[in-house]
Amino acid sequence: MSTHSARESSLTNFMRAAERNDILLYVTAAVGIFMPGCVYMLYQYAHKLYTEYVEKREMRKREEELESKVVTIFYAEGRGNVEELAHYIGAHLEYEGLPVVNLADIETAAFMKYRGVGLFLMDCTFGGNETESTEWFLEFLEDLAFDQKAINLPCRQMHFAVLGIGDSRSGHKQYYRVARALTRRLNSIGAVALCPLCCICSHSNTEKQAAIWASRIAKALDKYETKNTKCSRSFWYYNSESSSSSSDADDDDDDDDDGQKFLSKHVDYLYESDDADGDD
C-alpha cells in the first residue's frame, strides 16, 4: 500500500470515529459559540480605532481653526520707532497680549508653521531701501515660493495685511517699494490679503494714520470671523514640537469678496485722508 493511500485511510478512519463519538458536533458547537464573540471583539477593536481617528481628526481641525484666528504683528525696523507703532496698532485692535515680532527675530521653522493672520509694518532705510532683516525675509519668501517640497506648509494658508511707512515728500515708488515687494512675495506663496496694501507718511501724524489702518483691519478681521475668538497665542508657539507640522512680477487686477488676493498695485495712501474722519 502506498503512503498516499495510507494517509487517506487514516483520515477516513478518523472521520468515522469522530462521527461515532459526535466530536464534529462538539467542534461545530464550540465554533458557533466562540466565533460570534471573536467577531464582536474584533468589531469593538476596529470601532475603537476608528473613533480615536475621528476624534484626533476633529481635534486637529479645531486646532487648525484656532491657529487660523491667531493675529501677529510683524515689523521691520527702519528710520523710526516702528515697534512702538506696532504696539499702538495692537492696542487699537483691542487684542489682549497680541504678539509683536521683529522680522529680524523670525525663525523660518516657526514662520512656516504659522497659518494665522500676519499684519506687516514695513519701514525702510533713509535711502528708501530695505533693511538687512527685510532683505533676508524677502529672499526667504522667494525661496519658499519655488520650493515644491513646501507646497503644503501651513504658512501658505495665512492671511495678511501690509502697511508701508515712507516719506511722501521724496516720491512714492522708492519709499514704498519694500511694502510692494513684500505683498508680491506673500501672494507668491499662496497667502491671501485681508485688504489692499496701505501706505502712510512718516512726517504726517503716523499714529492717526495707523489708527485709520487699524480700523480697516478690524473690519476685515470681523469679515473673516477672526475677531469673534480673540486669540493671542504667541507666534513662538509655532516653533515648538507640539505645533502642526525673482517673484516680483506684477499680477492681474482681480479681487473679489470671497478672499481673492489684493495685488500690490492696489495701494491706498492714508496720509492723503489724514484730516478725514478716518474709518474709510
Image (cartoon, rainbow, N blue to C red):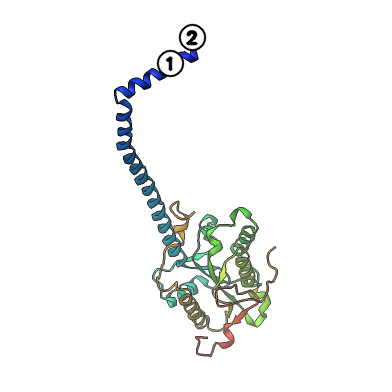
Q: Position of residue 184 (x, y in %)?
A: 64, 69
Is 227 located above or below residue 55 in the figure?
below
The residue labelled by disc 2 is 1
Q: Residue at x 50, y 90 (%)?
A: 277
| Residue 120 seen in render | no
- Element marked by disc 1: helix
Q: Which of the 4 image quarters holds residue 20?
A: top left
Is 50 located above or below residue 75 in the figure?
above
Which amino acid, by three-letter code, is at mark 1?
Ser
Which amino acid, by three-letter code, is at mark 2?
Met
Q: Residue at x 63, y 78 (%)?
A: 266
Q: Residues within 10 Å of mark 2 (few under 14, many from 20)?
A: few
Of 162 and 196, nearer the camera is 196
Q: Residues within 10 Å of mark 1 (few under 14, many from 20)?
A: few
Horizontal side of residue 253 vs 243, given as left or right: right
- Checking the image for residue 233, the label placed there is none
Q: Position of residue 39 (x, y in %)?
A: 36, 42
Of 32 and 175, nearer the camera is 32
The residue labelled by disc 1 is 9
Q: Residue at x 50, y 63 (%)?
A: 115
Of 222 and 135, nearer the camera is 222
